[in-house]
Amino acid sequence: MKRTKELIQLLKDNSGTLSTSEITSAGFSPGFLNYMSEKNLIVNETRGIWSLPEVPIDDLATITRRWKRCVVSYGSALWLHDLTDRTPHVIDLTVPEGYMPRTTHKEFPNIIFHTVIKEKYEIGLSEAKTPAGNIVPAYDKERCICDVLKARNSNNIDIQVFSESLKRYFADPTPDMKKLSNYAKLLHVSNELHRYTEVLL
């Protein structure tokens, strides 16, 4: 009973979700996890990810905990940063070149992967909070703006989401123009950024 309460408290202290490695490193055995699951005291969300039954389903947290090099990006990151009201119907994730998690599409068929070289993968790498309260790896606002500028060039983004995200970003009293300009150079969208900032600023 004591160990049961300890594991439940450990999960509560971590937004209700942890990986197997995080739990076992705290001193709980895999066998104990199976026992807790059989008693319906915890839920196995996906391979290696455990949560409390009352915790809302959070696909972004589940995916990024299991496949740790996945970064929330594009429309999904815009939504987390409140740069759009449009709730994503797909999950946008960016991964480094050469990394492609197996079985993701089988378990989460609505994922769209964006592959970039390592140097670009690390630009703007940050974190964001999901509606369920979990912290997930996500690109910062400035990287998001650069990504939508690039997506607009290839007509790979809804025009309303594109316009709304730019207007919301530049409506901020203190947009980080220095960071944004630096990212734009690194991601080769400086001309596009200049074109739209002339209109919005």
Image (cartoon, rainbow, N blue to C red):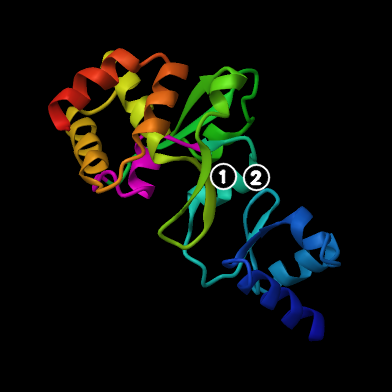
Point out residue 197 in the picture as x, y percentages from the top left corner. 21, 26
Q: Is residue 77 magenta?
A: yes
Point out residue 71 in the picture as x, y percentages from the top left corner. 53, 37
Looking at the picture, which amino acid does disc 1 mark?
Ile
Q: Is residue 156 left or right of residue 137?
A: left
Tell which of 141 and 93 is nearer to you.
141
Using a 10 Å C-alpha cutoff, classify the residue at mark 1 as few (fewer than 14 neighbours), some (14 to 19) or many (20 or more): many
Point out the residue furthest to the left here.
Answer: 199
Q: Secondary structure at mark 1?
A: helix
Q: Is residue 30 left or right of residue 150?
A: right
* Mark 2 touches mark 1? (CB < 8 Å): yes
Q: Residue at x 65, y 74 (%)?
A: 41
Looking at the picture, which amino acid does disc 2 mark?
Arg
Point out residue 14 in the picture as x, y percentages from the top left corner. 62, 66
Q: Is residue 188 magenta?
A: no
Whether residue 120 can be seen here? yes
For the C terminus, give its image quadrant: top left
Q: Secondary structure at mark 2?
A: helix
Residue indicated by mark 1: 63
Q: Residue at x 44, y 35 (%)?
A: 73
Residue 182 falls in image quadrant: top left
Residue indicated by mark 2: 66
Point out residue 200 in the picture as x, y percentages from the top left corner. 16, 31
Tell which of 6 and 41 is nearer to you.
6
**68, above or below 12, in the image:** above
For the N terminus, give its image quadrant: bottom right
Using a 10 Å C-alpha cutoff, classify the residue at mark 2 as few (fewer than 14 neighbours), some (14 to 19) or many (20 or more): some
The residue range painted magenta reads: 72-86
Q: Residue at x 30, y 22 (%)?
A: 149
